[in-house]
Image (cartoon, rainbow, N blue to C red):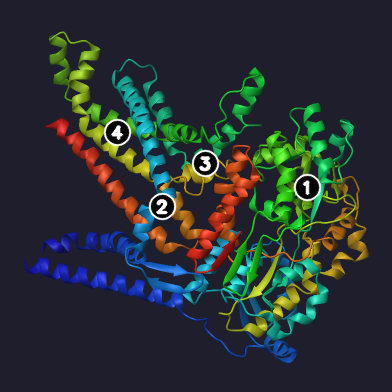
Amino acid sequence: MGWAFVGPFMGVFLLVFVAPVLYAFYLSLFQNQMVGGDKFVGGANYLQALADPQFWDSVIRVVVFLVVQVPIMLFLALFAALALDSGRLRASSFFRISVFLPYAVPAVVATLMWGFIYGPRFGLFGSINDFFGLNLAEPLSSSWILASIGNINTWEFTGYNMLIFYSALKVIPAELYEAANLDGAGTFRVIRSIKLPSIRGAIGIASIFSVIGSFQLFNEPNILKALAPNSISSYFTPNMYAFNLSFAGQQFNYAAAISIIMGVLTVIVAYVVQLSGSRKDA
Amino acid sequence: MKNNHRFRRVATAALAASLLVGGLAACSGSGTPASAGAEGASAEDIAKALDTETTLTVWGWAPQLEPIVKAFEAKYPKVHVNLENVGTGNAHYTKLQNAVKAGSGAPDVAQIEYNALPQFALSEALVDLKEFGAEELKDNYTESTWGSVNLNGGVYALPQDSGPMAMFYRADVFEKHGISVPTTWDEYVEAGKKLHAADPKAYITSDTGDAGFTTSMIWQAGGKPYTLDGSTKVAVDLQDEGARKWTGTWNQLLKNDLLSPVTSWSDEWYKGLSDGSIATLIIGAWMPANLESGAAGASGQWRVAPMPTYEKGAAATAENGGGGDAVLKQSKNKAAAYGFLQFANGPEGAKIHAANGGFPSTKADLESESFLNAENAYFGGQKINEVLVQASKDVVPGWSYLPFQTYANSIYSDTVGQAYGSKGDLNDGLKAWQDATAKYGQQQGFTVTTK
């Protein structure tokens, strides 16, 4: 009887999740050549990927991105959520919606918008440099591009993470605050001893979402590539590499192998993040 | 327990099914073209096919295809044409390649640009139009466009538009700074230096690296970096004399910061074309319509001159873009499909094409009085077609693209683009591009030699 209840879910799950993954795995065992057609190559694509400097280049880039951007974004989100929760803000609902609003802007539109702002000649950056006679950073140059993308992502997702934290803060029982008050605890003591420990679970969840998001980085660099073709290579992130291999290079099989490796890597990293989070809980 | 067992059986079946689907897809990939053998047809066969109830599917994105299809259907009411725009450029080729690989789902006729044609012709996706007597049409088209569709002894498409390169320049900017319009590349570099010195915001041109532009520039310089021998042997040499001639000129512009760092087709680019901070464009003859719509503010300021050359007075240019229409081997009605090509890419279609802003590849249209003498108000009343048509006659012969040019172009910014980004030596970038291209060719089963 039990299976009848989970049956519909299982059917959809198999069809849209398990089957594509299995098919990608199956594809990754072959090689297709313009001259020579298809042949079974076993694990050769995996060995090639593990020794492919372009693949590792892209993996290292998203790891750097993750290590820098995720903490900054989560800290900002946490700060905003604590500020909201403090109840000392004027027009707090306006503050809440305006921080959250960028999340409602589609990533494609957000990136195009930031692309205009970053423009070296006629964009906002160009105009500011011109006006003050400065030569500030060129956001689309290859040394700044990762930071520029990080900025777009932070702008987009801080509000989303703020809402996760804020809703976790809202369910903390008021008695704890009253008790703390009686004990003479100040605001920062309350944050450190009550608020932060209570929302540790939410912080863990937000971290995992952000880690997965970083590993899947694609929209922002792929759109900015049209504006900064030399700063963003075809293997800028693992997803872009797989995409270009498969849709520009017809190397579906190799792209499938890279996707599988990336999937496994993401699961491992997310699991490690979760483990370290839950250990603190205990 | 029992339920668990049943689930497992279902799971196994689903797994088997997914593997089966995969297996089928993989098999069809290696399949041979659907029908081989005699596919040729005489003029009567084609006329008969056009007088029979048929439906043709045409894939293309050129805006001129729509009026051409309408006129075709009016002339041959029994043939219905489904014109489908499945994407522009690479998106279109990816879908086409997938349909070819799958063995079904390809259209009867597809638009294919000259630089992508070898990829489809050599992988035997296209019908050799010689079987319909297409070689007799040779004299109707310019030499360079015919050379682009005539590959390995076959004719794989009929040309539609062409893009002989010319120099589009801002007469007002040149006049303001007292700079004469360059006719050689040395003069061009000098003009670039003078202009940038006179106005630090103005650049002789913009270029952040573009594969199509680079290959066309090497083409004009007399380079032949890609040579094909049969359908599986390829030689790549991006350091031949022509390539070095081009880098010799372009390195000077790049290293002296004389190229506007604005990427082509971006919003900023059009602004630069409007406000005069980009003073020239070396680009295909299809550009005027784009300038008129994208840089409307500069109306009356642009002019057209022949492309600068390496030797004074020795006119030379190259094709930049442009393409034709091909018949797919999967087509069930090749005679009617060829009939469509005869109309669309023949005199009737070419007229409609030119009337809708296209730059033709047919000699008759290029040399017609009305085309040559048309005064273009956007270009201050200049008869721009005189310059552009002359350019179509000065294209350096003997060029060919790679059978995997679309991929090679997609990794251009990883290699040559890096030299642009760091203002380094373009020769290093070209060498890296050559290596990456050769590596891909070998992975794809070609025999690739490099120098």
The dot on residue A109 is 3
The residue that disc 4 covers is: A164
- Say if residue B320 shows up in the picture: yes
Marks 2 and 3 belong to one chain: yes
Q: Amino acid at mark 2?
A: Asp
Q: Residue at x 68, y 71 (%)?
A: B325
The residue that disc 2 covers is: A52
SS at badge 2: loop
Image depth: mark 2 or mark 3 in front: 2
Cα–Cα span, label 2 and label 1: 46 Å
Which one is in front, B121 or B288?
Answer: B121
User: What chain does badge 2 belong to?
Assistant: A
First in sequence: mark 2 or mark 3? Answer: 2
Q: Which quarter shows the C terminus of chain B? A: bottom right
The 10 Å Cα crowd at callout 3, few under 14, some 14 to 19, many 20 or more, is few
Q: Residue at x 74, y 85 (%)?
A: B133
